[in-house]
Image: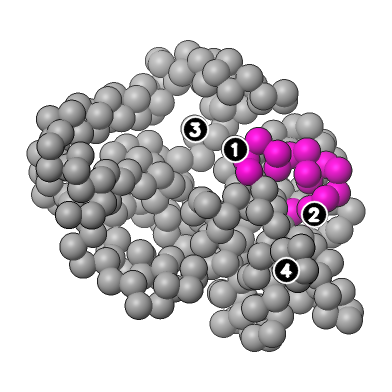
Amino acid sequence: MGGMIIGSISVNKSSTAYDFAALTEYDVDLDDPAGTMLNTDGTIRVHTGIDTTTGYFGGFRGYLYSAWQDGKLTEDQYNLLRSVKTSDKDGGIVHIQFDSQVTALLQDKVQMLCSGNTLNVAKERGGDDVTILSSPYEDPVGACVIIASGEVLEEKQDKVLKVMKAFDKACADIENPETKESVSEYCAEFYNVSGWTADSQETFFNSQYWDICMMKDVEDFLIRKAALLDYNDFDPTGRIDYSFLEAMYGDDPYTYDPATGTLI
């Protein structure tokens, strides 16, 4: 048996799934990607730094896909912006690991980031030179998907359940007003990143609904994300194991509803 998805740790509290940090001088307008992310000759004006091994890669491509479908990009512009820059070919995406993203942005090696709490660090360090932007398109997202290998699922089910319960306790401490501050202080000290404070961490915590989630329609979500990564024949059937979450909470899947601000 191969690896299985067994849960999602958190869900964004915003109906906009992905935020960006951009250098203010470039005046990026996510409602006008062709006019602000490309030069008049069609070449790349704004390169976006992303850790392409993470979900932000699919998230940024999702934004571009929606812009293309909305008529704000031609197919050629869409394909150029969604491609990864290499040594011999330009592209709108530059692969940068999380710990190098802020420096790359502030040194103008890239002009925008699609990431997580790195965006807040970039804003705190860059001040008015950095602008936080939000995608104008809705895209449901589970912020952290939990995956276990087939071997672990077969041989260490008790340990997997203990890990899930530990995640559940951690999420409860983040959501609890009486413990959130101390958890934020611990995380900021653990990260030990210049400009990242306990207040920064708490702001990030407040942007998510922290829980061990079973996302509704997760199969459709996975098919869409796989297509954005060019896995067009992806079949999620048999790739999700709800049994551990069912053992903890029952068998009703749920996800975050941005209209009501609750898990449903």
Checking the image for residue 205, the label placed there is 3
Question: Residue drawn at (35%, 51%), measured in percent from left and top?
Answer: 256
Q: Amino acid at mark 1?
A: Asn
- The N terminus, quarter of image: bottom left
Is residue 263 visible to the viewer in this orientation of the structure?
no
Q: Residues within 10 Å of mark 4 (few under 14, many from 20)?
A: some
- Mark 1 and mark 4 lie on one chain; the one further toward the N terminus is 4
Q: CA distance from mark 1 to mark 4?
A: 24 Å
Q: Is residue 236 above or below residue 204?
A: below
Secondary-structure class at tag 2: loop
Marks 2 and 3, how far apart at CA: 26 Å
Image position, residue 110 (x, y; %): 79, 53
**What span is colored magenta in the figure?**
97-112
Amino acid, disc 4: Gly
Residue shown at the point (59%, 38%) measured from the top left: 117
Q: Position of residue 4 (x, y in %)?
A: 24, 52
Q: Which mark is residue 91?
A: 4
Dot 3 crowding, Cα within 10 Å, few <14, some 14–19, many 20+? many
Residue to which mark 1 is pinned: 117
From the viewer's perspective, is the residue at label 2 or at label 3 nearer? Answer: 2
When the figure is inspected, residue 46 is found, relative to residue 184, above or below; the finding is below
Please give the label number shown on residue 111: 2
> Would residue 68 appear left or right of 206 to someone viewing this image?
right
Q: Is residue 260 above or below residue 153?
A: below
Instruction: Report whether residue 122 is seen.
Output: yes
Amino acid at circle 2: Gln
Q: Could you say where residue 163 lies in the image, as x and y percent from the top left?
A: 25, 29
Residues 230 and 168: in front is: 230
Q: Which circle's residue, 1 or 2, is located before the other in the chain?
A: 2
